[in-house]
Amino acid sequence: MSDALNYLVKARPEAMTAYFTFLKKAGDHLDTRTRDLISVITKVAVQTEGGFRQYLTRALRNGATPNEVIDALLMAFPVLGLAKIVWATEILLDMDIPEFRPENLDAEPAWHTVAAVEAIPDGRPEWYEADGRHVFVYRTGEELRVYDSRCPHQVTDIPHLAIDGVRLTCPKHEWAFDLDSGDCVAKGNRPLRRFEHKVEEGQLLAYW
């Protein structure tokens, strides 16, 4: 929560607890994905960029597709108006989420070649680009781990310079991750997305 909300919770705990309880109960009969899409629209309505990024990330994590997000925004056109939809779209373009690129909107998950296994360093995380997506690969002996470079907080594309040993720190809000496990070890509470992978003919392939 923001500093302001933390203050209100401390200053008026009974009132704020009742308010948050009301918000949770109000969505009891909606599935998680629908609640998340409504939250995305409300953040666009008030043009709160941080909230939009956060709830967009949550909606995607809970199963909403990019096409559903776009449809939800367009269906809310009578209330939002074109200017706010354009505002949200500009943020989406700035986030450059691979799944939202026009060529990927209807794409089915597939295997993508990441690198030759023999070229992947042992015991040192490495950053790769594969078919328009960045991934971090950590190899220890025969074991390989392939992680999405996108921070699970607000989908920030974490750069390769953010690696320090086996620790990866997102430069935007300092969420830190252990590349041995993918777990978040500082600031946040969600792990990196880990991709299914396989080795064929000496090549590392990842599935997304």
Image (cartoon, rainbow, N blue to C red):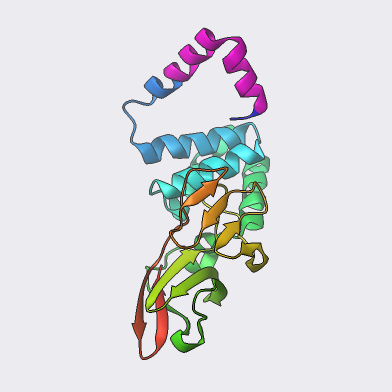
Residue at x-position 49% and y-position 79%? 122
Q: At which x and y percent is residue 183?
A: 46, 53
Classify residue 198 as left or right of residue 127: left
Residue at x-position 51% and y-position 87%? 119
- Secondary structure mainly formed by the magenta segment: helix
Instruction: Answer above or below: position of 58 versus 39.
Output: below
Q: Residue furthest bottom?
A: 201
Instruction: Answer above or below: position of 143 versus 16.
Output: below
Which quadrant holds the N terminus? Answer: top right
Can you tell which quarter of the image residue 85 is in?
Answer: top right
Q: Does the segment drawn in magenta span residue 5?
A: yes
Q: At which x and y percent is residue 75?
A: 49, 41
Can you tell which quarter of the image residue 84 is in?
Answer: top right
Q: At which x and y percent is residue 29?
A: 31, 27
Residue 150 visible, this orientation: yes
User: How many numbered discs, if any?
Assistant: 0
Which quadrant holds the C terminus? Answer: bottom left
Q: At which x and y percent is residue 98?
A: 53, 64
Q: Residue furthest left?
A: 29
Residue at x-position 34% and y-position 31%? 30
Residue 80 visible, this orientation: no
Q: Say which of 131 and 118 sits in front.
A: 118
Q: Say which of 74 and 152 sits in front.
A: 152
Q: Does the segment drawn in magenta span residue 207?
A: no
Instruction: Answer above or below: position of 149 versus 52.
Output: below
- Residue range (magenta): 3-22
